[in-house]
Image: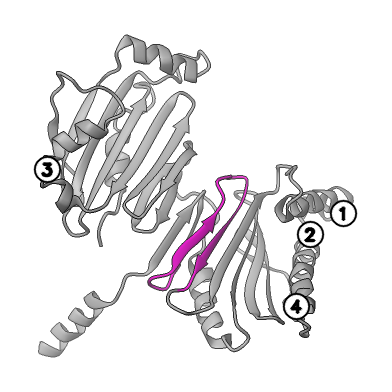
Amino acid sequence: MASQSVSTLKQEEQPAATVIGWQGIRCVLPPDWNLVSFSLERDSGYLRVDAPADSALTVQIRWLDAGHTQEPNSIYGYLMRFLQKRGRSNPRSTAGPDLKASLEKLLKETEKHARKEHVRFECHLKPEHIEGERRAINFSWVGGGRGQGKIWHCTQCNRVVMAQVVGLTKDHAAIASVAAKLFGTLQDHSIDGRDLWALYDLQIEVPNTFRLKEQQLYSGHLKLVFGRSGERLVVERWGLASTTLKRFTLDEWFRNQALIGLKNRQSGPLELPMGHEAVFYRFQLPIWNRIGALKSAMGKPSCAATHYAGGGWVCEATNRIYILQLFYNKRADEDLWHEVASRCRCHS
């Protein structure tokens, strides 16, 4: 019994894995990796996640929608135009983009950097194969560093994704270990109609019909603003809850942060699945707010926000305050606030 207790304790003390979720892309990496770079676009974008401490390892993920032409003269725009051009002229276009040709183009960019450093560059491509909904090619390269990755086309979401783990030439074993974890967990589209948004210590699932409109990412404050026609969803995470709550009650803090006036309105307690009690407000929007929402919905009453739902809770385990505000159309989903709040993982 004692040995089992010690084993269980060691498991609980192990640091949590790093969960990344952005624009329909999601993956799991070893503990304490850091998201250092990302794009805001959904159709064509990238993520970069770095290993902790002094490690030179980094994960790079690039994706694009094979059905959209990208105009900018970036490597992503070039890749998209290249894929579409090959798709029109290639007899195999019904099978999707030519992955090998596009991968070779990208590896040439890596080879150029190696030549600038006057080192030999070698790359190896494995045969194209099928992985469920994907056609994929695994690859590796050495020269001015080392990389191990994969490029694939997903028939369900029509995304072309290239992901790789990059490090120093001597990091062969470490790169292989991280790549195994990356490719064992990496998803390229929404699951059950929801996108996972996971960065730093925030993890929340949002319906994939919402699109990211704004973001503010600071150490003490994370804010993501999503839009869907005339509806708006705002997710915020604040740090140092214990310090804040020395000056304010949770209800006072929320009223100060609310995006709509709450004068003469009363909150009600609401139990959340993760064990927290939230302060919660729900009411029909005043007429002047509904007029503004109708303009945002391009004059479509069926899409315009007619109601407000907002609330917040304290997570003592992480010393954070979470706030969720929703301007929604009652015809859409009156329980949407509770659904999103229930899918916010604020602690292990």
Numbered disc in front, either 1 or 3: 3
Of the 4 image quadrants, the one containing the N terminus is bottom left
User: Badge 2: few (under 14), some or many (20 or more) residues near its Cα, within 10 Å?
Assistant: many
Give me the residue at 16% from left, 85% from top.
6
Give me the residue at 26% from left, 32% from top.
310
Look at the image and give the residue range highlighted in magenta: 28-51
Q: Tag 2 or tag 4, which sits nearer the N-term? A: 2
Q: Which mark is residue 72?
A: none
Q: Is residue 197 left or right of residue 121?
A: left
Q: CA distance from mark 1 to mark 2?
A: 8 Å
Q: CA distance from mark 4 to mark 2?
A: 25 Å
The reply to whether callout 1 and callout 3 are in contact (CB within 8 Å) is no
Q: Amino acid at mark 2?
A: Asp
Secondary element under disc 2, as helix, strand or loop, is loop
Circle 4 residue: 114
The location of residue 241, given as percent across then percent down, is 19, 51
Circle 3 residue: 247
Q: Which mark is residue 90?
A: 1
Numbered disc in front, either 4 or 2: 4
Circle 2 residue: 98
Q: Tag 2 or tag 3, which sits nearer the N-term? A: 2
Q: CA distance from mark 4 to mark 3?
A: 57 Å
Give me the residue at 75% from left, 78% from top.
114
Q: Amino acid at mark 4?
A: Ala
